[in-house]
Image (spheres, rainbow, N blue to C red):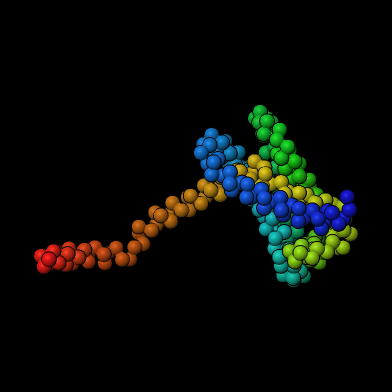
Protein backbone atom coordinates (compact mmCIF):
# COMPACT_ATOMS: atom_id res chain seq x y z
CA UNK A 1 0.00 0.00 0.00
CA UNK A 2 1.37 3.42 -0.96
CA UNK A 3 0.62 6.93 0.19
CA UNK A 4 -1.28 7.45 -3.04
CA UNK A 5 -3.80 4.78 -2.09
CA UNK A 6 -4.18 5.91 1.54
CA UNK A 7 -4.55 9.63 0.88
CA UNK A 8 -5.87 9.88 -2.69
CA UNK A 9 -7.82 6.72 -3.56
CA UNK A 10 -9.11 5.75 -0.11
CA UNK A 11 -10.93 9.05 0.66
CA UNK A 12 -13.03 8.76 -2.48
CA UNK A 13 -13.71 5.06 -1.92
CA UNK A 14 -14.84 5.93 1.61
CA UNK A 15 -17.13 8.67 0.30
CA UNK A 16 -18.74 6.32 -2.23
CA UNK A 17 -19.21 3.64 0.44
CA UNK A 18 -20.70 6.17 2.86
CA UNK A 19 -23.18 7.52 0.30
CA UNK A 20 -24.19 3.98 -0.70
CA UNK A 21 -24.65 3.02 2.94
CA UNK A 22 -26.77 6.08 3.65
CA UNK A 23 -29.00 5.24 0.69
CA UNK A 24 -29.42 1.65 1.85
CA UNK A 25 -30.10 2.85 5.39
CA UNK A 26 -32.83 5.22 4.18
CA UNK A 27 -34.48 2.48 2.14
CA UNK A 28 -34.46 0.06 5.07
CA UNK A 29 -35.49 2.56 7.75
CA UNK A 30 -39.19 2.43 6.84
CA UNK A 31 -39.31 -1.32 7.33
CA UNK A 32 -37.46 -1.16 10.62
CA UNK A 33 -39.74 1.44 12.17
CA UNK A 34 -42.24 -1.32 12.86
CA UNK A 35 -39.71 -3.25 14.94
CA UNK A 36 -40.67 -1.80 18.29
CA UNK A 37 -38.51 -4.27 20.16
CA UNK A 38 -35.39 -3.21 18.33
CA UNK A 39 -36.29 0.42 18.79
CA UNK A 40 -36.69 -0.04 22.53
CA UNK A 41 -33.40 -1.92 22.73
CA UNK A 42 -31.66 0.84 20.78
CA UNK A 43 -33.21 3.38 23.10
CA UNK A 44 -31.71 1.58 26.08
CA UNK A 45 -28.28 1.61 24.51
CA UNK A 46 -28.44 5.31 23.69
CA UNK A 47 -29.71 6.30 27.13
CA UNK A 48 -27.62 6.83 30.22
CA UNK A 49 -24.79 8.98 31.43
CA UNK A 50 -22.07 7.18 29.47
CA UNK A 51 -23.80 7.64 26.14
CA UNK A 52 -24.51 11.29 26.89
CA UNK A 53 -20.89 11.86 27.88
CA UNK A 54 -19.67 10.14 24.75
CA UNK A 55 -21.94 12.15 22.46
CA UNK A 56 -21.06 15.46 24.11
CA UNK A 57 -17.31 14.80 24.12
CA UNK A 58 -17.09 13.50 20.56
CA UNK A 59 -19.32 16.37 19.45
CA UNK A 60 -16.86 18.90 20.88
CA UNK A 61 -13.93 17.13 19.20
CA UNK A 62 -15.75 16.92 15.86
CA UNK A 63 -16.78 20.58 16.02
CA UNK A 64 -13.20 21.61 16.70
CA UNK A 65 -11.94 19.61 13.73
CA UNK A 66 -14.65 21.04 11.49
CA UNK A 67 -13.83 24.64 12.41
CA UNK A 68 -10.09 24.06 12.01
CA UNK A 69 -10.45 22.54 8.54
CA UNK A 70 -13.21 24.85 7.27
CA UNK A 71 -11.70 28.09 8.58
CA UNK A 72 -7.93 27.59 8.87
CA UNK A 73 -7.19 31.31 8.62
CA UNK A 74 -9.50 32.13 11.52
CA UNK A 75 -7.96 29.31 13.54
CA UNK A 76 -4.45 30.68 12.98
CA UNK A 77 -5.55 34.19 13.98
CA UNK A 78 -7.15 32.79 17.14
CA UNK A 79 -3.96 30.92 18.02
CA UNK A 80 -1.80 34.02 17.76
CA UNK A 81 -2.51 34.60 21.44
CA UNK A 82 -0.72 31.95 23.56
CA UNK A 83 -3.47 31.94 26.18
CA UNK A 84 -6.17 31.24 23.61
CA UNK A 85 -4.02 28.60 21.94
CA UNK A 86 -3.41 26.82 25.26
CA UNK A 87 -7.11 27.01 26.16
CA UNK A 88 -8.15 25.57 22.80
CA UNK A 89 -5.67 22.71 22.98
CA UNK A 90 -6.60 21.94 26.60
CA UNK A 91 -10.31 21.85 25.76
CA UNK A 92 -9.71 19.50 22.83
CA UNK A 93 -7.50 17.23 24.92
CA UNK A 94 -10.04 17.08 27.75
CA UNK A 95 -12.88 16.29 25.33
CA UNK A 96 -10.85 13.54 23.63
CA UNK A 97 -9.96 11.99 27.00
CA UNK A 98 -13.63 12.03 28.02
CA UNK A 99 -14.63 10.45 24.70
CA UNK A 100 -12.05 7.68 25.05
CA UNK A 101 -12.94 6.96 28.68
CA UNK A 102 -16.67 6.83 27.98
CA UNK A 103 -16.16 4.63 24.90
CA UNK A 104 -14.10 2.11 26.88
CA UNK A 105 -16.65 2.19 29.71
CA UNK A 106 -19.54 1.56 27.31
CA UNK A 107 -17.72 -1.38 25.75
CA UNK A 108 -17.02 -2.86 29.19
CA UNK A 109 -20.62 -2.29 30.24
CA UNK A 110 -21.96 -4.13 27.23
CA UNK A 111 -19.69 -7.09 27.88
CA UNK A 112 -20.65 -7.25 31.56
CA UNK A 113 -24.33 -7.09 30.63
CA UNK A 114 -23.93 -10.25 28.52
CA UNK A 115 -24.28 -8.21 25.34
CA UNK A 116 -21.09 -9.51 23.76
CA UNK A 117 -23.26 -10.84 20.94
CA UNK A 118 -23.52 -7.24 19.76
CA UNK A 119 -19.80 -7.42 18.91
CA UNK A 120 -20.09 -10.56 16.80
CA UNK A 121 -20.99 -8.57 13.72
CA UNK A 122 -17.84 -7.78 11.73
CA UNK A 123 -19.01 -4.23 11.19
CA UNK A 124 -19.44 -3.68 14.94
CA UNK A 125 -16.01 -5.10 15.77
CA UNK A 126 -14.35 -3.00 13.10
CA UNK A 127 -16.30 0.09 14.11
CA UNK A 128 -15.40 -0.08 17.79
CA UNK A 129 -11.77 -0.90 16.97
CA UNK A 130 -11.49 2.02 14.57
CA UNK A 131 -13.09 4.36 17.10
CA UNK A 132 -10.59 3.36 19.76
CA UNK A 133 -7.64 3.76 17.39
CA UNK A 134 -8.98 7.04 16.05
CA UNK A 135 -9.32 8.64 19.48
CA UNK A 136 -6.09 7.13 20.82
CA UNK A 137 -4.10 8.32 17.80
CA UNK A 138 -5.63 11.77 18.13
CA UNK A 139 -4.56 11.90 21.76
CA UNK A 140 -1.06 10.78 20.75
CA UNK A 141 -0.88 13.60 18.22
CA UNK A 142 -2.09 16.13 20.80
CA UNK A 143 0.47 15.00 23.40
CA UNK A 144 3.52 14.23 21.24
CA UNK A 145 3.09 16.94 18.61
CA UNK A 146 1.70 19.96 20.39
CA UNK A 147 -0.27 22.82 18.91
CA UNK A 148 -1.88 20.62 16.27
CA UNK A 149 -4.63 23.20 15.77
CA UNK A 150 -1.98 25.50 14.27
CA UNK A 151 0.17 23.21 12.15
CA UNK A 152 -2.82 21.24 10.88
CA UNK A 153 -4.20 24.47 9.40
CA UNK A 154 -1.28 24.58 6.94
CA UNK A 155 -0.98 20.85 6.30
CA UNK A 156 -4.20 18.87 6.76
CA UNK A 157 -6.65 21.69 5.97
CA UNK A 158 -5.19 22.31 2.46
CA UNK A 159 -5.23 18.55 1.86
CA UNK A 160 -8.92 18.28 2.82
CA UNK A 161 -9.70 21.25 0.57
CA UNK A 162 -7.88 19.57 -2.32
CA UNK A 163 -10.07 16.48 -1.88
CA UNK A 164 -13.20 18.58 -2.26
CA UNK A 165 -11.73 20.23 -5.34
CA UNK A 166 -11.21 16.73 -6.81
CA UNK A 167 -7.53 17.58 -7.14
CA UNK A 168 -6.00 15.74 -4.17
CA UNK A 169 -2.53 16.78 -3.06
CA UNK A 170 -1.05 14.35 -0.54
CA UNK A 171 2.52 15.71 -0.43
CA UNK A 172 2.12 17.44 2.93
CA UNK A 173 0.14 14.74 4.73
CA UNK A 174 2.42 11.96 3.45
CA UNK A 175 5.28 13.54 5.42
CA UNK A 176 3.35 13.86 8.67
CA UNK A 177 4.17 11.65 11.69
CA UNK A 178 2.82 8.11 11.79
CA UNK A 179 0.24 8.92 14.48
CA UNK A 180 -1.22 11.69 12.32
CA UNK A 181 -1.40 9.52 9.22
CA UNK A 182 -3.02 6.75 11.24
CA UNK A 183 -5.54 9.28 12.52
CA UNK A 184 -6.43 10.27 8.97
CA UNK A 185 -6.67 6.67 7.79
CA UNK A 186 -9.06 5.72 10.61
CA UNK A 187 -11.20 8.78 9.86
CA UNK A 188 -11.65 7.68 6.24
CA UNK A 189 -12.31 4.10 7.30
CA UNK A 190 -14.94 5.23 9.81
CA UNK A 191 -16.63 7.32 7.13
CA UNK A 192 -16.95 4.20 5.00
CA UNK A 193 -18.18 1.77 7.66
CA UNK A 194 -20.44 3.82 9.96
CA UNK A 195 -23.50 3.78 7.64
CA UNK A 196 -23.42 -0.04 7.64
CA UNK A 197 -23.14 -0.43 11.40
CA UNK A 198 -25.71 -0.69 14.16
CA UNK A 199 -24.64 2.76 15.34
CA UNK A 200 -26.15 4.27 12.20
CA UNK A 201 -29.50 2.64 13.00
CA UNK A 202 -29.35 3.97 16.55
CA UNK A 203 -28.50 7.44 15.29
CA UNK A 204 -31.24 7.31 12.66
CA UNK A 205 -33.77 6.26 15.31
CA UNK A 206 -32.67 9.12 17.57
CA UNK A 207 -32.95 11.63 14.73
CA UNK A 208 -36.37 10.25 13.80
CA UNK A 209 -37.62 10.57 17.37
CA UNK A 210 -36.26 14.12 17.59
CA UNK A 211 -37.93 15.06 14.31
CA UNK A 212 -41.25 13.61 15.48
CA UNK A 213 -41.05 15.52 18.76
CA UNK A 214 -40.23 18.72 16.91
CA UNK A 215 -43.13 18.12 14.54
CA UNK A 216 -45.49 17.48 17.45
CA UNK A 217 -44.42 20.75 19.08
CA UNK A 218 -44.99 22.65 15.85
CA UNK A 219 -48.44 21.11 15.48
CA UNK A 220 -49.30 22.00 19.08
CA UNK A 221 -48.23 25.60 18.54
CA UNK A 222 -50.05 26.11 15.23
CA UNK A 223 -53.62 26.17 16.66
CA UNK A 224 -52.58 29.01 18.96
CA UNK A 225 -51.30 31.05 16.02
CA UNK A 226 -54.18 31.44 13.65
CA UNK A 227 -54.73 35.17 13.11
CA UNK A 228 -57.62 34.59 10.72
CA UNK A 229 -59.60 32.27 12.99
CA UNK A 230 -61.36 35.16 14.71
CA UNK A 231 -62.15 36.85 11.43
CA UNK A 232 -63.47 33.58 10.01
CA UNK A 233 -65.73 33.10 13.04
CA UNK A 234 -67.09 36.66 12.67
CA UNK A 235 -67.71 36.15 8.96
CA UNK A 236 -69.62 32.90 9.47
CA UNK A 237 -73.03 34.49 10.28
CA UNK A 238 -72.72 36.75 7.23
CA UNK A 239 -71.95 33.74 5.07
CA UNK A 240 -75.03 31.94 6.38
CA UNK A 241 -77.25 34.90 5.62
CA UNK A 242 -75.86 35.32 2.13
CA UNK A 243 -76.37 31.62 1.43
CA UNK A 244 -79.94 31.82 2.72
CA UNK A 245 -80.75 34.84 0.55
CA UNK A 246 -79.33 33.16 -2.50
CA UNK A 247 -81.53 30.14 -1.80
CA UNK A 248 -84.64 32.29 -1.46
CA UNK A 249 -83.92 34.11 -4.74
CA UNK A 250 -83.49 30.82 -6.54
Residue ID at (84%, 61%): 170
Question: Would you place residue 36 above or below residue 160 in this image?
Answer: above
Q: Can residue 226 be seen at all in this image of the molecule?
A: yes
Count of labels shown?
A: 0
Residue with the most extreme front position: 250
Horizontal side, residue 91 vs residue 225: left or right: right
**Quadrant location of the C terminus in the rendered image:** bottom left
Q: Toward the viewer: 10 or 234?
A: 10
Measuring from the top left, give residue 22's x and y in whole percent: 64, 50
Is 67 placed left or right of 218 in the picture?
right
Identify the image quadrant of residue 45. Answer: top right
Residue 198 in picture, x, y percent from top left? 64, 41
Considering only vertical position in the picture, is 195 above or below 105?
below
In the depicted structure, whether residue 59 falls above or below residue 238? above
Q: Is residue 24 toward the left or the right of residue 243 in the image?
A: right
Q: Quadrant of the rendered structure where residue 5 is?
A: bottom right
- Kindly identify the residue that appears in the image at 41 percent across and 54 percent down: 219
What residue is at 70 percent from the left and 63 percent from the top? 67
Q: Nearer the viewer, residue 76 or 228?
A: 228
Q: Residue at position x 70%, y 39% from top?
A: 124
> Where residue 229 sits: x, y (%)?
29, 63
Say whether residue 108 is visible. Answer: no
Please say if 65 is above or below 120: below
Position in image of residue 51 (x %, y %):
63, 43
Residue at the left extreme of this rendering: 248
Amino acid sequence: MTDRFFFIVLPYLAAVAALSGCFVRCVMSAARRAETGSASADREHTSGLLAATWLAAIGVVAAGHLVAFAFPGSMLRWNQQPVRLAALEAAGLAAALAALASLVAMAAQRVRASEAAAFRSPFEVILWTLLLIEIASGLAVAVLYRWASSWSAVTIAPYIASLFRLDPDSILVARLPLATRLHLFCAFALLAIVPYSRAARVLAAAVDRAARRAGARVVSVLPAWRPFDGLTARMQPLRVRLTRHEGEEN
